[in-house]
């Protein structure tokens, strides 16, 4: 029997091989060629089985790889979402308004002034003016890299509305480059009191404080004198 | 609308879509970076960035966004940084009026277009109602 072809079963066996191969082609990788006898055809049958094994292995690998890639993609998408979220958070960072001295508020503005942020900034400032009764507010724009017409417009509006509440605004921190650019743009900011640095603005505000204090004292003295 | 002519010797540095306010900030920062790489001084950097910012805002506000192309090239015996803004917006109805100081159709200060023109060395604009607007800025080195 060995090394000889069992002619009786050979057609049946070849049919079986054909069946297995077509199953594999259709995607079923669990089938194997069953060989009961050992002869010349057995080598082919075994080779086919090995091929199917290899194919199964490769397929598994590529499925794993695909899953890996999909996982990575999902991770990247998540990261992107976080970045966008953080960007939005940064844009919305409301500017803190703090009282630094008697009668003096400071509002440091950092980053980009879009309409939404300016709205928040303006609301904060106006509310704080009402709450504290301060009559001087310093807007420091050292941290604003670009002042275009929209930013200038926002600043003007903020200053004007603060004035309606009885507070004078000083804008500080305009760099030489930005100053030249504002002039070339043609924007007139002369109605706003500006100082080069926050320090200058602070000194000016404190002097104004003293003046108004002196004024109040002298007025009170006058009133007292009259009453006497 | 007739497109601008491009010199084949120009190097394209980037094409950026403008859809959101974040894009304005991003493209503006790119503009500043390119100006810096171009060895422009801080004043020139600020000027070009501000001009770009004005046009980006117009694009965002009036035309619902658009696209910016940044090129580097040799124009009229100068090394130039070239910004091309293209949008498919409503176009500018009265260009002479839009280019005059203090005129605004959208509640701004009315210094955007004329201001941007004053900040750069070359300013070309083409616009067609209901088709879009094409603006090209150049800044010599």
Image (cartoon, coloured by chain):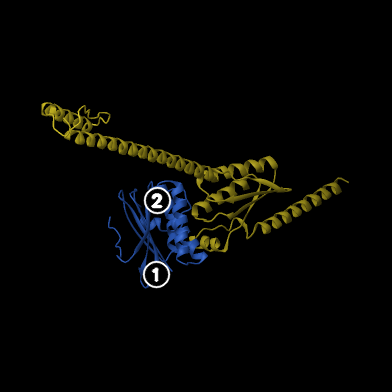
Q: Is residue B102 visible?
A: no
The quadrant where residue A33 appears = top left
Give the colour chain B carries in the figure.
blue
- Same chain for the residues under marks 1 and 2 in the image: yes
Residue marked by disc 1: B79
In the picture, which quadrant includes the N terminus of chain A? top left
Disc 2 is attached to a residue of which chain?
A: B
- Residue B68 appears at what percent x and percent y? 38, 54
Q: Give the left or right position of residue B73, taking residue A138 as reference.
A: left
Determine whether A94 is above or below A27 in the image. Answer: below
- Residue B129 appears at what percent x and percent y? 31, 50
Q: Secondary structure at mark 2?
A: helix
What is the crowding at mark 2: few (fewer than 14 residues within 10 Å), some, or many (at least 20)?
Answer: many
- Residue B6 appears at what percent x and percent y? 30, 63
Residue marked by disc 2: B59
Q: Secondary structure at mark 1?
A: strand
Outermost residue, front side: A1
The residue closer to the viewer here, B37 or A215, is B37
What is the crowding at mark 1: few (fewer than 14 residues within 10 Å), some, or many (at least 20)?
Answer: some
Outermost residue, right side: A228
Determine whether A79 is above or below A180 in the image. Answer: above
Mark nearer the N terminus (1 vs 2) = 2
Query: Which chain is the one coloured yellow?
Result: A
Mark 1 and mark 2: span between their CA atoms?
27 Å
State yes or no: discs 1 and 2 in contact (Cβ < 8 Å): no
């Amino acid at each position: 029997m060995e090394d000889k072809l069992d002619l009786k079963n050979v057609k049946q066996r070849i049919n079986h091989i054909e069946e297995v191969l077509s199953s594999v082609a259709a995607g079923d990788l669990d089938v194997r060629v069953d060989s009961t006898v050992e002869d010349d055809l057995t080598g082919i049958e075994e080779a086919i089985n090995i091929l199917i094994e290899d194919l199964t292995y490769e397929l598994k690998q590529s499925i794993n790889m695909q899953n890996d890639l999909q996982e990575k993609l999902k991770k990247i998408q998540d990261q992107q979402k976080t970045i966008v979220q953080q960007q939005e958070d940064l844009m919305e960072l409301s500017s803190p308004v703090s009282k630094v001295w008697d009668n003096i508020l400071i509002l440091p503005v950092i980053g980009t002034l879009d309409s939404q942020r300016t709205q928040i900034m303006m609301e904060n400032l106006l509310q704080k003016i009402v709450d504290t009764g301060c009559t001087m507010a310093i807007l420091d724009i050292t941290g604003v890299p670009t002042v275009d017409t929209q930013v200038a417009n926002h600043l003007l509006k903020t200053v004007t509305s603060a004035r309606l509440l009885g507070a004078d605004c000083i804008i500080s921190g305009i760099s030489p480059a930005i100053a030249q650019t504002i002039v070339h743009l043609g924007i007139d900011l002369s109605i706003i009191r500006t100082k080069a640095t926050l320090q200058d603005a602070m000194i000016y505000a404190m002097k104004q404080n003293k003046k108004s204090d002196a004024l109040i004292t002298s007025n009170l003295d006058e009133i007292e004198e009259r009453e006497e | 609308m007739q497109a601008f002519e491009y010199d084949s010797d120009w190097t394209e540095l980037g094409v950026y879509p403008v859809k959101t306010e974040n894009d304005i900030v991003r493209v503006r920062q790119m503009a500043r970076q390119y100006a810096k790489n171009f060895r422009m001084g801080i004043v020139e950097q600020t000027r070009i960035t501000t001009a770009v910012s004005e046009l980006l805002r117009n694009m965002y506000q009036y035309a619902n966004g658009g696209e910016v192309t940044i090129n580097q090239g040799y124009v009229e015996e100068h090394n130039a940084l070239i910004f091309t803004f293209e949008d498919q917006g409503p176009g500018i109805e009265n260009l002479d009026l839009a280019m005059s100081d203090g005129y605004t159709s959208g509640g701004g200060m009315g210094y955007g277009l004329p201001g941007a023109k004053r900040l750069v060395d070359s300013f070309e604009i083409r616009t067609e109602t209901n088709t879009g607007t094409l603006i090209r800025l150049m800044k010599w080195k």
